Each structure stands twice: as structure tokens, then as C-alpha cells.
């Protein structure tokens, strides 16, 4: 089993930055794919991006490309999400997730951290 705990959420003004972190425990996730999702009120959960064991990353919505960056530290069992130039529409609960490389669906999820961007 893998437990995930996000941190770093909060309230920020539009144009500002936040850095979310997610720490995994239970076992090493260095070979797994780690990802970030978000869910805004009244909307479906959205894939933000993911990163593989070698640091190769992919991003979901076009709206975050160029503004958000995912990174990981395999030694620390962590994944970060650097969010720059934040917009009010980035307001959501952000979730960290992990899946084994051969699985298509994410298997483990954190509790989520709230990000609120004020205009």
C-alpha cells in the first residue's frame, strides 16, 4: 500500500505562484508514475500532469502547459507541482496520485489540498 500526503495549498492572488508537494510512504514509488489531478467545484476531476521514473513528464489541459511544472525526487519519494501565473480558474482541490508503470489507471490517491486563486 502507498499513502500519499499533499501539502502547499492555500490562497494566492492571480498571477502568483504556489508549489505543491506530495510525499509517498509505505513503499518506494521510484519506479511508479506519479501524477497530479484537480477538481473544481461542480466539475469533473481533471488530469493536470504526470511524471515517470526517469523524469519524463506529460501535461493534461492546454491551460496549464507552460505555467505548471511537475518534478520528482526519487530519493525522497516525493513529487512536486510548481504552479506559476495562477489564474482564478486554477482554483480547485489538487490531488496527488500514483500508479505502477504498467497500469493505465492511478491506484493510490492523496486526500487533496485546496488551491484558491483570487482575482
Image (cartoon, rainbow, N blue to C red):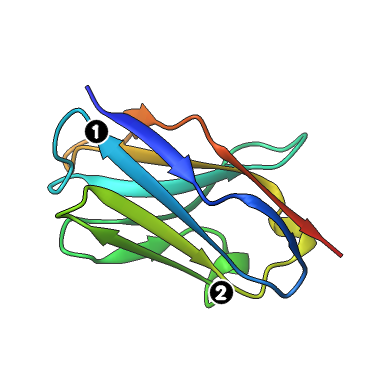
Q: Nearer the viewer, residue 65 or 92?
A: 92
* Residue in the picture at 39% in, 58% down: 80
Q: Residue furthest top?
A: 1
Crowd rating for badge 1 (residues with CA inside 10 Å; few <14, some 14–19, many 20+): some
Q: Position of residue 46 (x, y in %)?
A: 57, 45
Residue in the image at 24% along x and 33% along y: 25
Q: Residue 70: x, y in percent?
A: 39, 63
Label 1 belongs to which residue? 25
Is 91 situated above or below 106? below
Position of residue 83 measured from the top left corner of the image (x, y, whole percent): 55, 66
CA gap between label 1 and label 2 equals 28 Å
Mark 2 falls on what kind of element?
A: loop
- Locate residue 84, reporting x and y percent: 59, 73
Horizontal side, residue 39 vs residue 99: left or right:
right
Task: Judge left or right: residue 10 versus residue 6.
Answer: right
| Residue with the mark numbered 2 | 67
Kindly indicate the quadrant of the structure image that contains residue 39.
Answer: top right
Amino acid at each position: 500500500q502507498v499513502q500519499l500526503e499533499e501539502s502547499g495549498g492555500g490562497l494566492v492572488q492571480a498571477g502568483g505562484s504556489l508549489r505543491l508537494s506530495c510525499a509517498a510512504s509505505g513503499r518506494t514509488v521510484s519506479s511508479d508514475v506519479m501524477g497530479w489531478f484537480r477538481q473544481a467545484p461542480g466539475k469533473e476531476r481533471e488530469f493536470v500532469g504526470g511524471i515517470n521514473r526517469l523524469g519524463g513528464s506529460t501535461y493534461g489541459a492546454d491551460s496549464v502547459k507552460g505555467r505548471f511544472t511537475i518534478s520528482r525526487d526519487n530519493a525522497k519519494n516525493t513529487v512536486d507541482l510548481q504552479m506559476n501565473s495562477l489564474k482564478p480558474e486554477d482554483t480547485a482541490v489538487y490531488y496527488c496520485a500514483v500508479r505502477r508503470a504498467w497500469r493505465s489507471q492511478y491506484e493510490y490517491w492523496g486526500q487533496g489540498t485546496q488551491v484558491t486563486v483570487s482575482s
